[in-house]
Amino acid sequence: MKQCIKLLSLILTISLLCSCAGKTPDGNDGTLNSVTEYNQTESQEKDNGANKGDVAAFSREKKSHSYGVAKNGVPHEISVTAQKYFEDNSFKAFCLDTQTQKKVLYLTFDCGYENGYTSKILDVLKEKNVPAAFFCTLNDVRDNPDLIKRMINEGHIVGNHSVTHPSFAEISRDQMKDEIVTFENYLKENFNGYFEPYFRFPKGEYTDEALDLVGKLGYFSVFWSLSYADWDTNAQKGADYAYEKVISRLHPGAVILLHSVSSDNAGAMARIIDEARRQGYEFRSLRDFGN
C-alpha cells in the first residue's frame, strides 16, 4: 500500500513539473513567452542606453555641419575630414561614402512642410527609377499622409527629421530622445509599423553627445557632402540654376541634400538625373551605403 502511495505521489509531481514547463503564469506557451521576454529586454536595453549613456565622455560643444563646395569631381576636404571623424570615434554617422571608389550618389530631401512640389519630384524619381530618402518632420507626415504612403510604396526611405525641428545642440538629452521617439512612434502607429533607421539633424546642428544618443536609439545620423542654398521659397532662381549647382558639385560617394519645397529642384530633377548618369554615376539607396 505504501509503495502504491509513493508511486502515485511521484506521478503527480512529474505531471506538475511538465505543466509548469509548458505554460507561463499568463497562460502563454513557453516558446511564445521567451520571444516576448526577448523583445521586452531588447527594448529596455535600447531605452536604458539612450538614457544612461556615458554622457560625461561626450562633448556638448555645438557643431554645425559644413560640407564645403566640391569641385572637379572631388569631395571637399571638409567632408572628408568630417567622415573620418565619425569613423574614428565610432559614431553611427556619415556624410560621404568613402568605402567605395565607384561613382555612386545618394539622393536625399529634407521635408519640413509641403509646398506643392513633392509629387512632381516623386513622378520624376518613379519615371527614372531612382531611390531617395525623404527626411520629414512630424507635421509634414501628419499633414500629408498620402505623400508619405506613396514614398513608402514606391520604395523610398521616410527618414526621421524630428518633431519640431529644434537645434539638437541646444536641447537636453531627454528632449532629444522625445523628438526622435515621438516621430518614430507616430510613423509606426499610422503606417503599418514602418521604420527606417535614418535620422537627420535639424539645421545640421549637433554635439558629440547628440551623435551618441542617436546611435543608441538605433539610428544612423545622415549628413551630406553636396548641397546648395535652395530652401528659401522666396529666392528661387530657376531650374537651370539648380541644375548647374548640383551637376558642378557631383563627386563619387556624394550624399546629396536638396529641399522638396524648391520649385527649382522640381524643375531640374529629370535633367540632373540624366546628366549624372551620362557622366557614369549610379543612384543608390541609403540602405546600400558603403556597398
Image: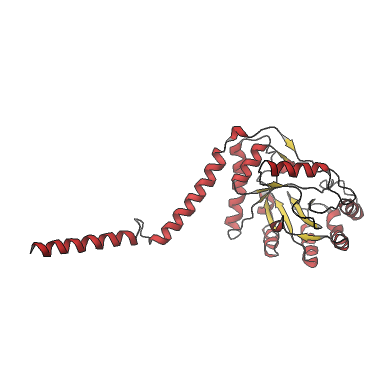
Count of numbered badges drawn on the protein: 0
Q: Considering depth in this image, is 21 or 188 the residue closer to the camera? A: 21
What residue is shown at x 81% (from left), y 63% (from top)? 124
Q: Is residue 123 visible?
A: yes
Quarter of the picture containing the C terminus is: bottom right
Say whether residue 227 is left or right of residue 41. right
Question: Height in image: 78 above or below 104?
Answer: above
Name the foreground residue: 138 vs 55: 55
The residue shown at (77%, 61%) is 122
Give percent across and percent down for residue 54: 57, 36
Residue 165 visible to an observer of this rendering: no
Side of 53 relative to 257 (left or right):
left
Residue 23 spot, x, y in % from top left: 34, 60
Query: Which image quarter is the N terminus in?
Result: bottom left
Q: Quadrant of residue 276?
A: bottom right
Residue 154 x %, y %: 70, 65
For residue 240, what is the image quadrant? bottom right
